[in-house]
Image (cartoon, rainbow, N blue to C red):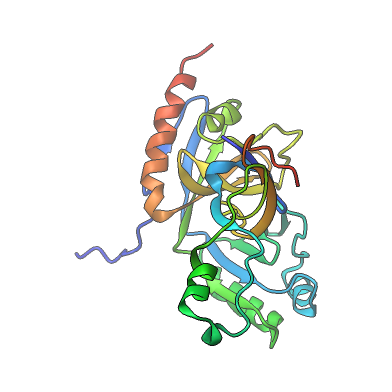
Amino acid sequence: MMLIPCPWCGPRDESEFHYGGQAGVAYPDDPGALTDAEWARYLFFRDNPKGPFRERWSHTAGCRRWFSLVRDTVTNEIVA
Amino acid sequence: MADRNFRHSPLEGFSSGGAVAMSEVPFLAQINLRLDPAGPAAAAVGKDLGVALPRRGGTSATSGDVSVLWLGPDEWLVVGPPGAETRLTALLESAAGAAHASVVDVSAQRTAVALRGPRVRELLALGCSLDLHPRVFGVGDCAQTMLAHAPVVVWRRESEFWILVRASFAGHLAAWLEDAGIEFTVRD
């Protein structure tokens, strides 16, 4: 069980959270101008690094706020 | 004669003795309030309620028979005695005025279970991973978390813990509490 630091509620069990995938994926400025391939790349393609990974989490069983953190995908250590 | 009392609480008749005494606190007035904590509406609501909206996470504030529990950075649960929901809703709506705010009567969403006794923390620790030691979780502190896999609000009051639990989870939680409390009924 990971202990995830919610910025509002403090450290809580991982089971109180919902995972939101990679952080910082910007919505396209003009989605209508994208080709299908570009749209699919926006929708489905995500980084999969071995090491620090910036990702979204939601504290669903607590304050229900979304926040970002950096987790090491090898050790599960939360580094920021 | 027909039963004219149509109102039934989720844990009607629930109570349990022993080292941890449990009973339902039914029909509490509960209003969910969302607004900008730094805006003038927050100050107006605090003034009308007689107590400022708590800004620090996991705390509550009480004025008379009305308490305000922190649920999120811009969200609170205003808890009052049974029957106060109309008065509280009107008070909050008028205090919030034209501000971007949400006032919703959620009294029917949750019921409350009051737990008392010297072994309360030990009992809760069987199903909740929060540190409820008085040094960490003092009088007035509250937290939204999981207890026995049910989403709850744990609220420490003067001499007891109140567990606010959704109506549909209440039966499960009460059964779990009674079962978990068995080991504390043996006198030591």
Query: Is residue B31 among what the camera can see?
Result: yes
Seen from the viewer's position, the closer of residues B72 and B76 is: B72
Seen from the viewer's position, the closer of residues B69 and A26 is: A26
- Can you say which quadrant of the picture contains the C terminus of chain B? top right
Q: In the image, is residue B30 above or below residue A38? A: above
- Can you say which quadrant of the picture contains the N terminus of chain B? bottom left
Q: Quadrant of residue B55?
A: bottom right
Q: Residue at x 65, y 38 (%)?
A: B159
Q: Is residue A42 left or right of residue B158?
A: left
Q: Residue at x 73, y 74 (%)?
A: B36
Q: Residue at x 46, y 78 (%)?
A: A36
In the rendered image, the residue lying farthest to the left is B1
Q: In the image, is residue A19 above or below residue B91? A: above
Q: Which x, y percent locates residue B68?
A: 67, 60
Q: Is residue B108 left or right of residue A18?
A: left
Q: Which x, y percent locates residue B166?
A: 45, 54
Q: Which x, y percent locates residue B86?
A: 54, 75
Seen from the viewer's position, the closer of residues B5 and B139 is: B139
Q: Quadrant of residue A5?
A: top right
Query: Is residue A5 among what the camera can see?
Result: no
